[in-house]
Amino acid sequence: MLKEEIAKVSRALAERSGQLNDLVSKSLNALRDQLGGSTLSSYLALQGKFTQGEIGEQEYNMQRDYFRNELSGMIRRLDEARKLMMIMAQLESRSPSPNMQSGQPVNRPQPTS
């Protein structure tokens, strides 16, 4: 009965880990597309236009604030993805070892008082 419970928990952890992995992959791909695409390059282009005097200070400030907010949001989402990846790594490290699934006991050190 213990083997069955361990197998159930192991399957549940593997399934949840797979779901988290998919979520993180999708989030990272979306962020990569955004960072590599319009937001960052548009922000840099805005800096160039302002430096060359092509746009006024008021328009520059409005657009700069918009891009900064967008980039801050992307950084927040990257941080969330990093945290999810850390959780996934912890789940994988806690997965039962093959010895436990085969029914062989695992020798664990006994706490000493």
Image (cartoon, rainbow, N blue to C red):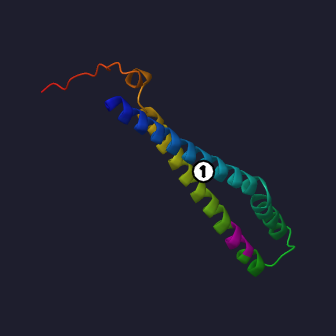
The quarter of the image holding the C terminus is top left
- 90 vs 67, nearest the viewer: 90
Classify residue 111 as left or right of residue 70.
Answer: left
Query: Over which residues does the magenta segment extend?
Result: 63-67
The quarter of the image holding the N terminus is top left
Label 1 crowd (10 A; few <14 / some 14-19 / many >=20): some
Residue 64 magenta: yes
Give the vertical position of 101 relative to 16 (above or below). above
Relative image position of residue 42 (x, y in whole percent): 80, 63
Q: Judging from the image, what secondary structure is the residue with disc 1 in? A: helix
Residue 57 magenta: no
Which amino acid, mark 1?
A: Leu
Residue shown at the point (84%, 68%) measured from the top left: 49
Residue shown at the point (52%, 42%) measured from the top left: 15
Residue that carries the numbered disc 1 in the rendered image:
23
Relative image position of residue 58 (x, y in whole percent): 74, 81
Q: Which secondary structure class fits the magenta region best? A: helix
- 104 vs 25, nearest the viewer: 104
Res 8 quadrant in image: top left
Res 9 quadrant in image: top left
Give the vertical position of 58 relative to 68 (above or below). below
Q: Residue furthest bottom?
A: 58
Residue shown at the point (46%, 42%) measured from the top left: 12
